[in-house]
Amino acid sequence: MHANDTIIAVSTPAGCAPRAVVRLSGQGAIEAVGRRFSCERDWRTTFTATPGTLSLPGEGGLRVPATVYVMRAPRSYTREDVVELHLPGSPPLLDMVLDELTTDGSVRIARAGEFTERAFLSGRIDLAQAEAVLAVIRARSEAELLAAGARLEGRASAEVASIQGELADLRALVEAGLDFGTEDIELISAADLLGRIEAAWGRIREQARTGQEDLSSDGAVRVVMCGPPNAGKSSLLNRLAEEEVALVHHRPGTTRDHLRRDVDVHGVNFALTDTAGLRTGGRGVEAKGVELARRLAGAAQLLVLVLDGSRPAADEDLAPARALERARVLCVVNKCDLPQALDEAPLMEVAAELVHVSALTGEGMEELREALGRAVFEGRLDASASDCLFNARQRDAVRRCAAHLGDARRAVQEALGSEFVALDLREATDALGEVTGAVTGQDILDRIFSRFCIGK
């Protein structure tokens, strides 16, 4: 297989349908279709759609109505000549079309993801956008589709490319300084170098923070459930998931780590994360669980603050909500089946909405689902999720970049020498190159594009 081959694949889902699309890309695409397509006018002009007939020689000489769409290089998805045949969506018919167009060897069946791979290799899109194409294909809800669309637009790539450009400039100055080291020429002072490294370090750490591995990066609306111990967070998670996914016990502090479950509510995929009860004075693993819970709460798209309605709330119970915009907080007063002792006045100061439920009896659960839906559909949340712009591979590259910049910062502070600074800057720049595709091994490309379906 060669990169300049003309490729073909069915680009619509398998199965019967009124219409299907067969896509070709490569320098022989127009010629291959031209030998079998007839119409009453010239159809080879770019950005045209022409109805006509596709001839399939063989038994019976089948003639199939088809519309041909032409996108000439370089103004196409792959920056090659692209031709699409829009045909009746009959699987046997599509097999016949593929057989006919590949019979003479001038066209071959595309590998999984090869159309998008060619778009990447031609510079039409960067690697982060290529992976966003896969996220669009796999989107299971409107929220996931919005998140994937944000990545496809290149929002993540733009910030990464900006930081990468700054690091490349710094690296050039440092490496040039090494060349002029014997001539007492200072291209950049240590103070200026340190300031610019710290600025880039801060920006990349923010990128790393907003794409934490503990939370969703697949387009789901990320919901973190937090509150004091024994407020009923795990029971609520079980109710929303409609199965026993979290251990529930009357003794406070049962949850010490976090537990995530994806739940579909009104067509929106919510990634619900149950966290350890927030309380002071814990030790060891319990203290680490509380620390993680606070960190997850601060990065949530939507914070569900769960409180026990049968007892007063401590001031520290509301602290995670106060750290966020009011629109991003939903307060759930649990145990509404018991006598109430909770003062609700302070709750409306920190939460956009308040819902009363009983995780024990199920009372109020439909109201809670409605409230989760409203948080998205009323526009209180950014469903495209700027903090969901990186997938796991990209987050790893961003974190490695931050680590290398931290090393560069220490090298300048401790006057270890420009050689060490240059090396750290080079490694930081290369790490970011793995996000955009500027520096990417073939094995990584193979792993990414092999996850695509044929025809994309």
Image (cartoon, grey):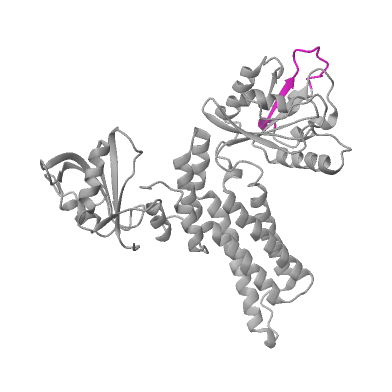
Percent across and percent down for residue 370 are 59, 21
Res 252 → quadrant: top right
Q: Nearer the viewer, residue 279 or 166?
A: 279
Percent across and percent down for residue 133 are 45, 47
The image shows residue 365, relative to residue 436, as above or below, that is above
Q: Nearer the viewer, residue 192 or 376?
A: 376
Q: Nearer the viewer, residue 380 or 149?
A: 149
Percent across and percent down for residue 392 are 59, 49
Location of the N terminus (image quadrant): bottom left
Which residue: 57% across, 54% down?
A: 159
User: Left or right: 31 with respect to 72?
Assistant: left
The image shows residue 169, relative to residue 305, as above or below, that is below
Res 174 → quadrant: bottom right
Q: Nearer the viewer, residue 351 or 236?
A: 236
Q: Residue furthest bottom?
A: 182
User: Left or right: 438 with respect to 123?
Assistant: right
The image shows residue 203, relative to residue 318, as above or below, that is below
Which residue: 23% across, 59% down?
A: 106
**What span is colored magenta in the figure?**
326-345
Residue 331 colored magenta? yes
